Amino acid sequence: MAAPKSSDRLLVFAPHCDDEALGAAGLMRQARAAKATVHVVIITNGDGFRIGVERDFRKLRVAPSDFMKYAYDRQNESRTAMGVLGVPSRDVAFL
């Protein structure tokens, strides 16, 4: 595969937060270094995973508000990771 050029556009779809970085970080970094446009779409926050929420908050009984905070935390982690790769926050969408 040829290296990305400035005229290229890259659209990355990820099932949930962190998959975009795990699956396509190298390509996104190359594309941004070449001044190509990169957009990321994250389909779900993964915040319905009770065990993840329990472990993150170190609680056996989690409330709906814990799931919401977990979702926002995961979104912020993805935005931060994309920022390191040069993808602006405005180009990251969460469904």
Image (spheres, grey):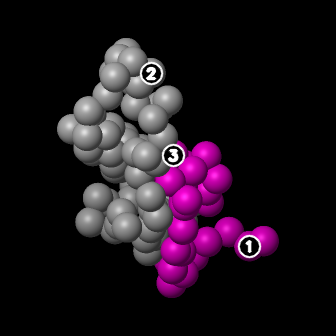
On screen, 18 above or below 20? Answer: above
SS under mark 2: helix
**Residue at image location 40% in from the left, 45% down from the top:** 47
Residue with the mark numbered 2: 55
In this view, 13 is above or below 24: below
Q: Earlier in the sequence, mark 2 or mark 1?
A: 1
Locate the N terminus and report the quarter of the image it occupies: bottom right
Q: Is residue 50 magenta?
A: no
State whether residue 70 appears in this view. yes
Q: CA distance from mark 2 to mark 1?
A: 42 Å
Which numbered dot is residue 41? none
Tell me the element at label 1.
Answer: loop
Residue at 54%, 68% in the rendered image: 12
Specify start and end residues of the magenta stretch as a single range.
Answer: 1-29
Residue furthest front as drawn: 61
User: Which residue is denoted by mark 3 in the rendering?
Assistant: 18
Q: Residue furthest left?
A: 65
List x then y, in percent, for residue 7.
51, 84
Q: CA distance from mark 1 to mark 3?
A: 25 Å
Are the residues at dot 1 and dot 3 in contact (C-beta closer than 8 Å)? Answer: no
Q: Pick whichever, 65 or 36, lies toward us.
A: 65
Judged left or right of residue 95, residue 64 is: left
In the picture provided, is 11 more to the left or to the right than 77? Answer: right
Reading the image, the residue beneath label 1 is 2
Residue at (57, 50) in percent of width and height: 19
Q: Residue furthest bottom?
A: 7
From what the image shows, is residue 54 above or below residue 23? above
Q: Amino acid at mark 1?
A: Ala
| Residue 79 image offset from top left, x and y in percent | 34, 50
* Circle 2: residue type: Arg
